[in-house]
Image: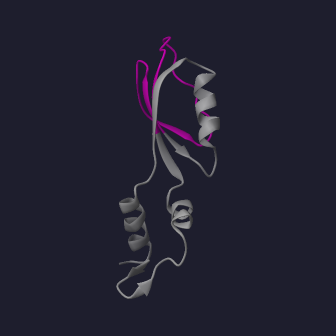
Amino acid sequence: MIGKGRILLDGSLSELKKRCSQEKTLTVDYSYNGKELNLVDGMTLHNNIQGHAVISIDTSVLSISEAISNITSQAEIYDLSLIGTTGEEMVVSLYKEFGI
């Protein structure tokens, strides 16, 4: 990838993903039993309203499967979605890193 005549990244798309997307957002609908979810290191709760939680996961600390296992050990999951960093966000991150 080149920005303003400078090489920002010389590698594959998978290398860019590893470099720029260590955080994923997990949205979960689960059986609410009146208790808050107990999250482990690498998980940050952003929103939790009676069975609907939005959690960020630092994949350099915790795998996605470990995060989901943590939640399923506490409640039944009805639905979940996982969102990673978009390509546009990765490019913006590189531009910021190189001051472009």
At a point 39% along the width and 71% down the height, the residue shown is 96
The percent position of residue 47, horizontal first and vertical second, equals 40, 31
At a point 41% along the width and 81% down the height, the residue shown is 2
Residue 27 visible to the viewer: no
Query: What range of the chain is rendered magenta?
Result: 26-55
Which of 30 and 97 lies nearest the eye of the viewer?
Answer: 30
Q: Quadrant of residue 76?
A: top right
Task: Specify whether 88 is left or right of 30.
Answer: left
Task: Specify whether 44 is left or right of 87.
Answer: right
Judge whether residue 41 is colored magenta: yes
Which of 25 and 96 lies nearest the eye of the viewer?
Answer: 25
Residue 14 visible to the viewer: yes
The percent position of residue 11, horizontal first and vertical second, equals 55, 74
The percent position of residue 50, horizontal first and vertical second, equals 41, 18
32 is higher (above) or lower (below) than 89? above
Task: Specify whether 75 is left or right of 87.
Answer: right
